Image (cartoon, rainbow, N blue to C red):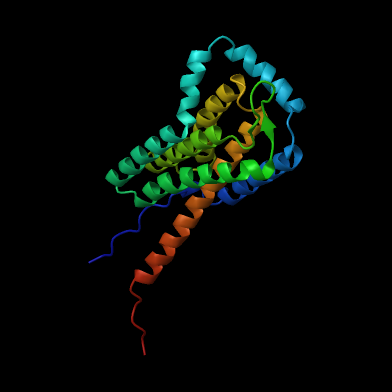
């Protein structure tokens, strides 16, 4: 009787480029965090991006509120639970674990890092709030990343290029829509949303790598070794 095949990898064709993508995301996050630590104003990138976003989304506040709600903590928790349940039904336990761990760690990281970095937005008539990185953008991006990895596993996408393109497109669509809404509503600067997106990518892909590594180690230990020939 042949042993059952091992469960599919979370990353699939993304296994090789994943460390590079994580490194780039961490680097961009670190540079932005260093640049805007303790700051309370918009930089050049923010000013240009704010103008572009306002030109596209101006006058649509009600729609923007609905879009940004996708990245709110209750919405992220709900989507994470739904994705975890769907993954279990599809017998993809690794993905079910990532659906909980990825968004959860992203939310924790963005919450803890905000006061440590100390960038603020607002003030005047109201109190200034911590801005970098954007938790809403990070939450939406982390959910988009899980959806993308689910699709990569189901289709499946055999080549690295199309897989990277699919994951990037879905994560950017989810995070970019929420991020643009947060910028237009004045809740975040554009660079805050970039920081939230980078945090979600680094944590999501990093968690997937760790889950795959632990699962592979457990499988190797449980696989019976052939008897030695004397």
Left or right: 160 with respect to 1? Answer: right
Q: Is residue 71 above or below residue 216?
A: above
- Give the residue drawn at x 58%, y 14%: 57
Quadrant placement of the C terminus: bottom left
Q: Is residue 1 above or below residue 89?
A: below
Q: Is residue 205 above or below residue 57?
A: below
- Give the residue drawn at x 54%, y 51%: 206
Quadrant placement of the N terminus: bottom left
- Give the residue drawn at x 42%, y 34%: 74
Q: How many marks?
A: 0
Image location of residue 111, percent across then percent down: 56, 42
For this rendering, which residue is in front, 151 or 133? 133
Image location of residue 51, percent across then percent down: 69, 16
Which quarter of the picture shows residue 156?
top left
| Residue located farthest toward the left when viewing the structure as drawn | 1
Which quarter of the picture shows residue 130?
top right
Q: Is residue 24 visible?
A: no
Q: Is residue 139 visible?
A: yes
For this rendering, which residue is in front, 227 or 89? 89
| Residue located farthest toward the bottom when viewing the structure as drawn | 230
For this rendering, which residue is in front, 198 or 19? 198
Image location of residue 161, percent across then percent down: 54, 40
Left or right: 69 with respect to 196? Answer: left
């Amino acid at each position: 009787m042949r042993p059952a095949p091992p469960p599919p990898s979370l990353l699939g064709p993304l296994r090789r480029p994943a460390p590079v993508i994580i490194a780039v995301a961490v680097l961009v996050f670190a540079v932005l965090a260093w640049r805007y630590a303790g700051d309370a104003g918009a930089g050049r990138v923010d000013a240009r991006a704010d103008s572009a976003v306002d030109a596209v989304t101006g006058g649509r506040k009600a729609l923007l509120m609905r879009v940004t709600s996708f990245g709110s903590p209750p919405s992220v928790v709900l989507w994470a639970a739904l994705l975890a349940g769907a993954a279990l039904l599809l017998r993809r336990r690794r993905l079910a674990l990532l659906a909980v761990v990825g968004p959860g760690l992203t939310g924790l990281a963005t919450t803890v890092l905000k006061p440590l970095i100390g960038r603020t937005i607002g003030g005047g008539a109201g109190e200034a709030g911590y801005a970098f990185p954007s938790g809403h953008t990070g939450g939406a991006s982390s959910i988009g990343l899980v959806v993308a990895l689910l699709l990569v596993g189901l289709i499946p996408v055999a080549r690295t290029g199309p897989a990277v393109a699919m994951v990037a497109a879905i994560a950017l669509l989810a995070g970019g829509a929420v991020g643009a809404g947060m910028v237009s509503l004045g809740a975040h600067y554009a660079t805050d949303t970039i920081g939230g997106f980078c945090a979600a990518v680094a944590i999501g892909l990093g968690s997937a790598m760790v889950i795959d590594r632990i699962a592979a180690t457990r499988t190797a230990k449980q696989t019976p070794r052939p008897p030695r020939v004397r």
